Image (tube, grey):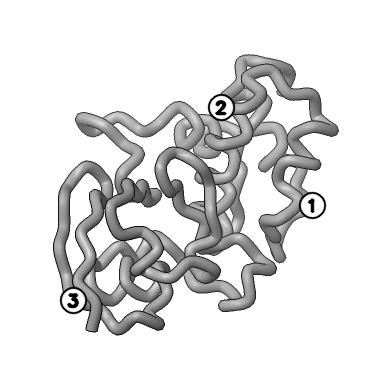
Amino acid sequence: MARITLTVDGEQVTDDVEPRTLLVHYLREHLGKTGTVIGCDTSNCGACTVHLDGRSVKSCNVLAVQADGHEVTTIEGLARGGELHPVQEAFRECHGLQCGFCTPGMIMQSIDLLAENPSPTEDEVRHGLEGNLCRCTGYHNIVRSVLHAAGGAQ
């Protein structure tokens, strides 16, 4: 076992974990952060995307011990004071989801994308979301949601 201490959604946690435990499993099974979805366990789909020190990572590709001493934000940690994060609100307003399975990862990746490029074009949004797959949509409303959150065209 390895002892880790990290901050998850603003709260410091300390736990003993098996060194091979993936961050996605730690978040879901130890902390109950089930909004972080397991989609493939191969880093192909992006459903498990979280922020590690403010940058998006696929948590099925990160060991929990690698997050020791770092800050993790999950989809559950975005809303503040009962108010949705602006990207969450944009996904709601623009119907940027269908079944919702990919939505947490899409939102987390979109926030990172907008932090790097606050005024992206449609092509830049599509390129920025390439590592996140949606099996239900043609991505139109997802892209529209990100552009709406950026204050751009819908």
- Secondary structure found at label 3: strand
Asked if 13 appears above or below 19 in the picture, the reply is above
The image quadrant of residue 127 is: top right
Depth check: give the residue in front, 86 or 115.
115
Q: Earlier in the sequence, mark 1 or mark 3?
A: 3
Q: Is residue 135 left or right of residue 105?
A: right
Q: Distance from label 3 to label 2 (Cα)?
A: 33 Å
Q: Label 3 is placed on what type of residue?
A: Asp
Q: Find residue 113 and name its label.
A: none
Q: Residue at x 32, y 72 (%)?
A: 26
Asked if 35 appears above or below 7 in the picture, the reply is below
Q: Mark 3 or mark 2: which is in front?
A: 3
Q: Label 2 is placed on what type of residue?
A: Ala
Q: Label 1 is placed on what type of residue?
A: Gly
The picture places residue 113, in percent across and down from the top left corner, at 62, 34
The picture places residue 100, in percent across and down from the top left corner, at 53, 58
Q: Residue under circle 1? A: 138
Is the residue under label 2 in contact with that under label 3 (CB below 8 Å)? Answer: no
Q: Earlier in the sequence, mark 2 or mark 1?
A: 2
Extreme right residue here?
A: 123
Q: Residue at x 62, y 27 (%)?
A: 116
- Secondary structure found at label 1: loop
Q: Residue under circle 3? A: 16
